[in-house]
Image (tube, rainbow, N blue to C red):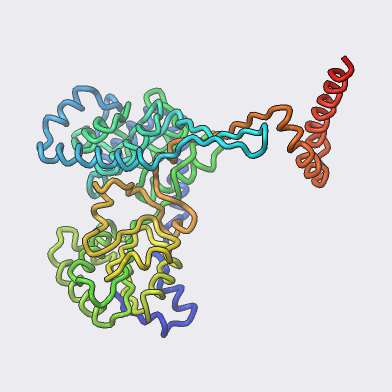
Amino acid sequence: MKQLDWNQLDESARREALARPTQSRTDDLSGGVARIVAAVRERGDDALREFSAAYDGCALDALEVTEAEFAAAEAALDPALKAAIDEAAARIEHYHRATASKPVAVETAPGVRLERIVRPINRVGLYVPAGTAPLPSTALMLGVPARVAGCRSVVLCSPARADGNCDAAVLYAARVTGVHRVFKIGGAQAIAAMAYGTASVPRCDKLFGPGNAWVTEAKLQVSVDANGASIDMPAGPSEVLVIADEQANPVFVAADLLSQAEHGVDSQVILLTPSKAMIEKAASEVERQCAQLPRREIAEKSLAQSRLILVDSLVQAVEVSNRYAPEHLIVQVQDPHALLDGIESAGAVFLGEWAPESLGDYCSGSNHVLPTYGHARSYSGVSVSSFQKQITVQDVSAAGLRAIGPCAATLAAAEQLEAHRRAVTLRLAALDARETTEASA
């Protein structure tokens, strides 16, 4: 990992120090995805079967997972894994129910009552990757809030293996969270199928979940098509930033850096510390631990574009972190809560030496589908609200119109929107006439 001193860098070098690996949106990628999307729209299930044979190496008769396949998956799973999935699902649900948006009602003036009512998105599509490894945890992170939100139809797509079956743990997690239908489809073709619908796959209103560059590009393409589907958030490779002081345990620091580095070759990890000794210890420990990892080659490529950065204080570390806006921020310092108020941009924050990011990935209860690539500056992680719509309701009495109507009429006139103004003043005139009639009766 490259070692840098933040205060010895000019502005250009600082930008370079925090630069993420370039996301490839080449003409080949965007064109290839566009062709896949077009093929699915034109030929539906036939195209999905062809792509499954070409990319997943399996011949599929039926695209949808059957009840017999769900039963076989559950029977094949180790009881300890099933128990862990059940435990994680319960904790995720507990947190998401507690943090779900609630209806609100308020009177903004006498006779003017406003409400915010919450409604679930009708049909949502969840994507669970199975590239270098299957991700049952993603099925939990998407399926649980969809159920808590009350979505009427929850569809999940995940690639099939060469034997034509989806990963057993993914299927079990989908069943535990109440997903209604699961399809053995992966890649950009799965995104297209859920966005536009086929004879087998229902069309979805909003799509969720991570994926490779092809999946990410497909989500972007369908999200800008008026006939496509909205998406959860822009996505990029996984990342973590660790803030550590001289008292931090370098073994833990290195483990946290490597936990993200092993995700993929385009992942990025950064350490910020005011301690030169910590940089040296962390670098040595990263090298030692990396050599022991089964995914060492992936981690090594990720580490080649990662940084160990010396800052002059923990306050400056927070400033640099906010500038980077990490997906995951781990604060391993003596008093981590003292830094929390200064943290403005991060997908998820982990405080103290006993809070590895891995807990958030699996079972602490928070969601691991988080904004990456700097999008934490303006986006939040997936939550129950991501699966809902918030609708404003206005209930106005005659007295309420009397109270606030003149304000609306004045503002409408200032904007030269005469029809807007008259929608108010005609009502006010009608009230005046009614009151005059009642007074003379």
- Which residue is painted at 25% across and 30% down in the image? 175
Q: Residue furthest right?
A: 440
Q: Is residue 378 left or right of residue 74?
A: right
Q: Can residue 344 be spotted in the picture?
A: yes
Q: Is residue 298 left or right of residue 40?
A: left
- Which residue is painted at 45% across and 28% down in the image? 122
Asked if 110 appears above or below 153 in the picture, the reply is: below
Residue 172 vs residue 149, the one in the foreground: 149
Q: Position of residue 138 (x, y in %)?
A: 29, 43
Q: Position of residue 219 (x, y in %)?
A: 44, 43
Asked if 255 appears above or below 391 in the picture, the reply is: below
Residue 344 vs residue 155, the one in the foreground: 344
The image quarter containing residue 97 is: top left
Q: Is residue 110 left or right of residue 382?
A: right
Q: Pick the quarter of the image with the N terminus.
A: bottom left
Q: Position of residue 342 (x, y in %)?
A: 43, 66
- Which residue is painted at 49% across and 78% down in the image? 11
Q: Can residue 43 be spotted in the picture?
A: no
Q: Pick the quarter of the image with the C terminus.
A: top right
Residue 350 vs residue 290, the one in the foreground: 350
Q: Is residue 18 left or right of residue 11?
A: left
- Which residue is painted at 25% across and 41% down in the image? 91
Q: Position of residue 159 (x, y in %)?
A: 28, 38
The image quarter containing residue 394 is: top right
